[in-house]
Image (cartoon, rainbow, N blue to C red):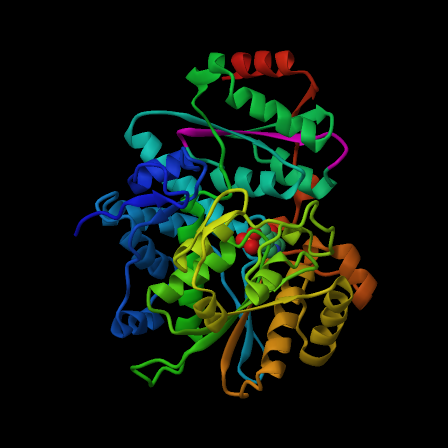
Amino acid sequence: MESIQYYSTNLKADKVTFSEALLKGLAPDKGLFMPTEIPTFTDKEIKSFTQKEYYEIAFEIIKKFLVGQINDKELLALVKDAYNFKVPLEKGFDNKYVMRLDQGPTASFKDFAARMMGRLMNYYIKKENRKLLILTATSGDTGSAIANAFYGLDNIKVLVLFPYGEVTDRQRKQMTTLGNNIQTISLKGKFDDCQALVKEAFSDSDLDYLNLSSANSINIGRLIPQIVYYFYSFSRLRKPSQDKPDNVIFSVPSGNFGDMMGGVLAKKMGLPIKKFVISVNENDEFPVFLKTGNYNKIEPSKNCLSSAMNVGHPSNLARLVALYGGVMNEKGEISKEPDMDLMRKEIYSISVTDQATKEMIKEAYEEHNLLLEPHGSVGWKGLMEFCREYNISKDQLCISLETAHPAKFPDEIKEILKFDPKLPASLEGLEDKEEFFDNLDNDYSKFKEYLKYNY
Ligand SMILES: *Cc1c(COP(=O)(O)O)cnc(C)c1O
């Protein structure tokens, strides 16, 4: 089989191989990389997933996108190492389930993408006998997900800059207690200062020898692993007797639309998805776009309870538009209309207010014994509204994604449900671990010296 090429959604850059797209992150024309063809599975292959473990399904899916780019044995070792945690499916009521994507090392669904991307990057870097320094600025969550995902990889080092005093104790400890190839800087400044230093380092040619890279969230290496849990959950919940499977509705709490893009790709690969419910918070640019066909970013984005979804211009929207035959650039300007009718047929989208998010946390817990945090609550609420509006039958299989662990939002849960959620094992015992980090002034020349001295 020939290997799949990757094109840029802005259509002004050359096509590249998977490993080039992975190591570049963003295309030179500022577009996002997408596969030129989407591989498919037969019904029989999809049925065989019922007998496979999560990592084995991940292997089958990722392999299709990396034909000729990695051998089976090596890929199998990487997925087995990346996916060593559970993916629980919890029943709400009728045939409606919550998929908990919160059992990874940072208790966020971002672990699924970041762990695989880290391992793939390490694999290609090592093959070329190179080393890489990942530089990342964080206001809390991204840094810990990246640090944990890359922890222990031998050819990649990670340096995280966080603003002194602006991250919570738990967020800080998730980064500073790792050690090994993970180094952290507490900067006397704000998040924007951290980001400015990182940006300046990237454009400083004196530092070319360091092979700096960003573990960018729009990397194609993060998108492909997010296809897997759609296939996995369906394989566990489908009726086993049927050769030709029934279909399923997924509800995805969304911000930058990376998660939902994994689902849309799963559908194109043959997973019988009847409808996507794309649930967003009060940043409602997408539901408005779907309804009217007019796209207007929300600037600045609104601050909502589901903070990881406070996005006024989803960075992966250009990819969705591309899959429906249109062209959207990085600024959100559409030069070719996507097929809006088809999009409306396959996707339903709804904006959920903070008030409704809180009410749903209470209702889900009291009526169905489901413990949801704000992001998962937005997803579940969207599903409930869709099922009501379209009179969806009780037997219809529906799966709503829970993207973070409730214990990461103790204040909200306590206010609404009056108890403290129990910490997942991955976050336990952090208090007692030793921290390592360096303090630095907000000054580029000092930061540069630091880089030269340490790497
Ligand atoms: C990042 C994030 C989301 C949004 O995912 P996107 O892929 O950006 O749509 C939802 N919930 C949580 C907890 C997240 O961290």
Q: x and y percent of residue 124 in the render?
A: 32, 35
Q: Is residue 164 magenta?
A: yes
| 433 shown above or below 420 | above
Residue 198 found in image quarter: top right
x 52%, y 72%: residue? 399
x 48%, y 56%: residue? 85
Q: Is residue 261 magenta?
A: no
Extreme residue toward the left, this view: 1
Q: Which residues are magenta?
A: 154-166
**Residue 248 visible, this orientation:** yes
| 248 shown above or below 401 | below
| 445 shown above or below 182 | above
Q: x and y percent of residue 61 in the render?
A: 33, 58
Q: x and y percent of residue 22 in the render?
A: 38, 39
Q: x and y percent of residue 4 in the render?
A: 26, 48
x 70%, y 43%: residue? 170
Q: Main secondary structure of the magenta part?
A: strand
**Residue 278 visible, this orientation:** no
The residue closer to the viewer here, 13 or 434, is 13
